[in-house]
Amino acid sequence: MSKKNVIVGQSGGPTSVINSSLYGVVTGFLGSEKIDKIYGMVNGIEGFLAGKTTVLSDLSKEELEILQTTPASYLKSCRFKLPEDLNDPVYPTLLKKFEEMNVGYFFYIGGNDSMDTVSKLSRYGAQVGTDILFMGVPKTIDNDLIVTDHTPGYGSAAKYVATTVRECALDAGVYAAPCVTVVEIMGRHAGWLTAASVLARKFEGDAPHLIYLPEVAFDLDQCLADVKKCLEKTNNVVVCISEGIADKDGKFICEYSGSADGAVDSFGHKKLTGSGKYLSEVIGEKLNVKVRSLEFSIIQRCGASLASATDIKEAAMAGSVAAKAALEGKTGMMVAFIREPGDEYKITYQLTDVNEVCNKEKPFPAEWITDGGTNIGDGYVKYALPLIQGASPVKLVDGLPAFLDLATTLKK
Amino acid sequence: MSKKNVIVGQSGGPTSVINSSLYGVVTGFLGSEKIDKIYGMVNGIEGFLAGKTTVLSDLSKEELEILQTTPASYLKSCRFKLPEDLNDPVYPTLLKKFEEMNVGYFFYIGGNDSMDTVSKLSRYGAQVGTDILFMGVPKTIDNDLIVTDHTPGYGSAAKYVATTVRECALDAGVYAAPCVTVVEIMGRHAGWLTAASVLARKFEGDAPHLIYLPEVAFDLDQCLADVKKCLEKTNNVVVCISEGIADKDGKFICEYSGSADGAVDSFGHKKLTGSGKYLSEVIGEKLNVKVRSLEFSIIQRCGASLASATDIKEAAMAGSVAAKAALEGKTGMMVAFIREPGDEYKITYQLTDVNEVCNKEKPFPAEWITDGGTNIGDGYVKYALPLIQGASPVKLVDGLPAFLDLATTLKK
């Protein structure tokens, strides 16, 4: 049997552990007799179409170890949606390129939109009868993929959010004067990441005092009443909101300010900025209180020093399990995490049909939203705590974390 | 000789290691036969005048260890300036309260304004002939105190800035389209903390590409030309600015937007917000490029997980050296760090007259500002690298750092 090459890409927004999955894919294939080279697409499918690739199997063992704790997509990323019509000429173009590179295995690490890419390629591949195997490895800090118990990247982002909300709450509380801190956390439609802020709470009455998820229609007047009530009990009120909170008519809160420009990204997602800023301004004005607005912005998904050891390990496993499965001939699949029943946290890795997963969203469970949509219940805490365990083993060099940068590798 | 009590306060903006100095003061006094109780003022002088105190000598050894790596002021803070006129009735009021509590040692941990408090109290004390000894322990992420080589708090904030700029630069560079990221870093008048962003640069041409300090008059047109030139070389331009950058007429850049409200804090400092936001908007509009604005806000001073082990250790030493000196009868002094000459980094702790330090600012050395005011030279890198060494020994409990919270302690 002739040896085949592997090609791996990363797509969508990066996470703190998306490179840990890349590490898992590479190390999962390394040593197999079926494999020759492992290529990386640079800037995903879009970069690949423009001829941008790198050779991952040339990385040293030491570089691979550093890759595992490097945040952001080492192979860069793209937001490129393949056409719905499988008769589009991009499909034979891609397949021809794969064949020219003797690719036998196509891997894509990403979220919902990336699983859509794997789905389309595997369906097109089946249609034309290719031998190439197509596999998806999940990642998203949004935690909104179905089937899987959680997604790689979520645990680290959740740990960042919980840790940083706790640190900021301590800082915000140092002055005696009443103060409201509004923290805006990523999440357009799913409140999973904002919910993680509840993990910062260490005693009754501790911050965060109010948590608003996009799953609940946001009522500005009710929120003002909620904040006012909190101010009667504490001088240091911390409010955590998802960037995507919207009112009962679906209007985003950031659109209230008139500053939202209605811009959309290439997937048609509305660009949301300023929900926290707007809300803090309204609170300051209406309640005549000092306010501070904090945006964790991209730091919550690239703050590698606060990554969860559990997440790093599971992300790598997701990659290597997918590699092993492909070596056994599997295609059109995504690795899902299945949580074993019982009190002890245990995950098994299972393959699931990528067509069942893509373009669907797992909402935050309604039963975990409590106190009239302002709090998160213990069910969530029990679910989330195992995901944030352990400190990242990131190596410090001269006081700063050692990261692997494609720009440096390419220069060698 | 009858035993005396100690009272310690924290004042001004908190840092990641201001509690390490508190730990140093407490442990520096513990075990001395001259000492009975160690009190903490809650909310500094202001809270003390309102009768708010706690007993620090009651903390367990384990609690003290946790205190050492807890960010934000454990004893809370205030921004309260004692009157210039030493005949003001607040001085005899304070002294009477100290005497009622049998206080023999007054300690204040803070920056410039706090050293002013120590200066005034010690001068008043000398005037009326009190036996109480007054000592200052420095802290400020701004690093702008004179005499001392650097201030506790700066190394950790610098480490946070360097690490996070590096992480964000990797994240911001994942897409192929040109993009400019503007990072706003704390610093009204002194660019010390913004300068630390240069530590993130790992090879020539790496981020950050442009660094603007408040020590140099900011020229918006020149900045646009600088950014344009960078965009010719890289698709991922990172610009780091101090919040306090101002033009040649002293007008803050955030005031250009018309949104600055001219509000001042209780020390008469202008409140600065939005320099980064404004600059990123102008860059996006004039250069027709995707922009992102990041504000590290209070996270850069409370991100305890990224604190420097060197800073934690030195902050504790500053506290304990001051305690030992007070036990030897010293008063009106602040602990300063003196760097030994030579290639090996070594600090000695020296007492300096607090009157010489307060109300003065150490500017960032002009010779370290290079490339026409857009870059930081190697002299700074050599100065700063020793200050960010080592990871914080912060303990994780259930996946989150263990912090000591006054609210919890008071409830016991």
Image (cartoon, coloured by chain):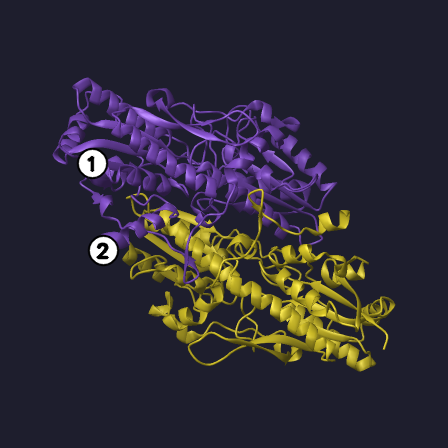
Chain colours: A yellow, B purple
Q: Residue B411 got which mark?
A: 2
Q: Position of residue A293 (x, y in %)?
A: 43, 49
Q: Which residue is mark 1?
A: B33
Q: Position of residue B233 (x, y in %)?
A: 74, 41
Question: Residue at the spot x=62%, y=73% of the render?
Answer: A359
The amino acid at mark 2 is Lys
Q: Disc 1: which chain?
A: B
Q: Secondary structure at mark 2?
A: helix
Q: Nearer the viewer, residue B308 or B273?
A: B308
The N terminus of chain A sits in image quarter: bottom right
Q: Position of residue B226 (x, y in %)?
A: 67, 34
Q: Quadrant of residue B342?
A: top right
Marks 1 and 2: in contact by CB < 8 Å?
no
Position of residue B182 relative to residue A347, above or below, is above
Q: CA distance from mark 2 to mark 1?
A: 30 Å
Tell me how many marks there are: 2
Position of residue B48 relative to residue A78, above or below, is above
Mark 1 is surrounded, within 10 Å at the Cα level, by few (under 14), some (14 to 19) or many (20 or more) other residues, namely few
Q: Quadrant of residue B19?
A: top left
Residue B89 in the figure: left or right of residue A120: left
Mark 2 is surrounded, within 10 Å at the Cα level, by few (under 14), some (14 to 19) or many (20 or more) other residues, namely few
Q: Earlier in the sequence, mark 2 or mark 1?
A: 1
The amino acid at mark 1 is Glu
Give the foreground label among 2 and 1. Answer: 1
Q: Can residue A282 be seen here? A: no
Position of residue A213 relative to residue B298, above or below, is below
